[in-house]
Image (cartoon, rainbow, N blue to C red):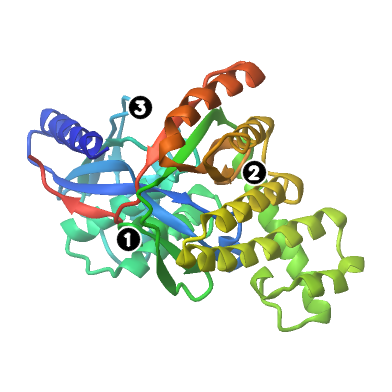
Amino acid sequence: MLADIVKTRETIAGLFRQRFGSDPLLVRSPGRVNLIGEHTDYNEGFVLPAAVDKAIVLAAAPRNDRRFRFVAADLHQDDEGSFEILAPSPLGWPDYLLGIVDQLEKTGRKVPGVDLVFGGTIPIGAGMSSSAAVEAGFLFLLNAMFDLGIPLLDMAKMAQRAENEFIGVRCGIMDQFANLFGTEGHVLRLDCRSLQYEAVPFRRADVSIVLCDTMVRHELASSEYNKRRRQCEEGVEALRRRHPAVKSLRDATPEMLADVRDLLDPVVERRCRYVVEENGRVLEGCADLRKGDLEAFGGRMILSHEGLRDLYEVSCRELDTLVEAALKLDGVFGARMMGGGFGGCTINLVREDCVEDFAREIPEVYRDAIGREMNLHLCRITGGTSLIQPK
């Protein structure tokens, strides 16, 4: 896996020299997994993500004419223009970069101009936050290149706002935070209200994190994501009528929800119940990891998937098929859908000596049930975004 990122680094740096004729500054920006705690971040709750060795490499050099030239190596697409006019691009992907410049401009930081090539090994649309890797990685690069002096936490907040405001996806801060604060061999128990975090050890050489990619990319995900967020806000408004101290679903208990059930639309009640229960699972799951009890932790992953499927209703047939198949195999501690939903990946904790059987059997089950191929990704927990040097 280290060889993959080295190869990517050399490829991206070589393409930059070919296109722009100079040596670039290089940044590695990781994707992330989330062991448990889905759709809790924008409800000011708890999440348990980690940066992984699937990553984007960004290569850039400064300009002084306020212009940009972007090259998306994996898409074989280019875009160029001026930072004087920050408008969404019809290509879509440049917006994740332009949104970062927009945030810098709003804080009074003018970007002189930049040439950029980027690409990597994060599967796009698989729920591993390739968008946050591009956003946070680009901001990290600009911060280093132009000596902007922006602290990591401020970078995470700015990258989140870029996606909220320029892209229009009302995501929480988990993805950007995990990208920047990732710690080798640890998952991050992040409090999405206070942004305090704890690095919880996850150093099990006998256990692999295996992602099963449905290869389904539903455009529904973004609109439904925003819809779920509105439903959660509606639930908070009802809770406040009888429990004024509730500021977000983070503050709610199962007993509070039961108390206001008569005020809630049944669908909204299910959404809120899932979030409240999931917050509890994150905290309990951290205690499991500290004790090394992966059986208990895996059981919470299963409950998480059931809640996402039945209460939050963001799963799909492909994801459910993969989870059900995984849980029938030996050596699987837990499995659940990961990410926004309606496609993307499942995350599985698999005993190392069972990974080979898992990798052989799961694709066969998926092919028989769904009639399509899928991909498997083995991930190792790594550190967050960092500068790298060309060979």
Q: Position of residue 308 (x, y in %)?
A: 68, 48
Which residue is labeled 3 in the image? Answer: 75
Check disc 1 and report the residue beneath it.
Answer: 183
**Residue 315 in view, yes or no:** yes
Is label 1 in contact with label 3 (beta carbons under 8 Å)? no
Which three-letter amino acid code belongs to the residue tagged 1? Thr
Q: Quadrant of residue 260?
A: bottom right
- Is residue 103 positioned above or below 27 on the image? below
Q: Residue at 48%, 62% (x, y): give it.
A: 289
User: Above or below — where is 322 with respect to 287?
Assistant: above
Element under disc 1:
loop
The alpha-carbon separation of the residues under discs 1 and 3 comes to 30 Å
Q: Where does the image place residue 85, in percent across and percent down from the top left?
A: 36, 47
Image location of residue 70, percent across then percent down: 27, 37
Residue in view at x 58 percent, y 18 percent: 367
Name the residue beneath numbered marker 2.
Answer: 223
Q: Quadrant of the N terminus?
A: top left
67, 220: nearer the viewer: 220
Camera-nearest residue between 209 and 4: 209
Mark 1 or 3, which is nearer the eye? 1
Compare marks 1 and 2 and give the one earlier in the sequence. Answer: 1
Q: Is residue 93 visible?
A: no
Quadrant for residue 364, please give it.
top right
User: Element type at marker 2?
Assistant: helix
Q: How many marks?
A: 3
Q: CA distance from mark 1 to mark 2?
A: 32 Å
* Foreground pick, 161 / 359: 359
Judge whether 142 appears above or below 367 on screen: below
Q: Amino acid at mark 2?
A: Ser
Q: Nearer the viewer, mark 1 or mark 2?
A: 1
Q: Earlier in the sequence, mark 2 or mark 3?
A: 3
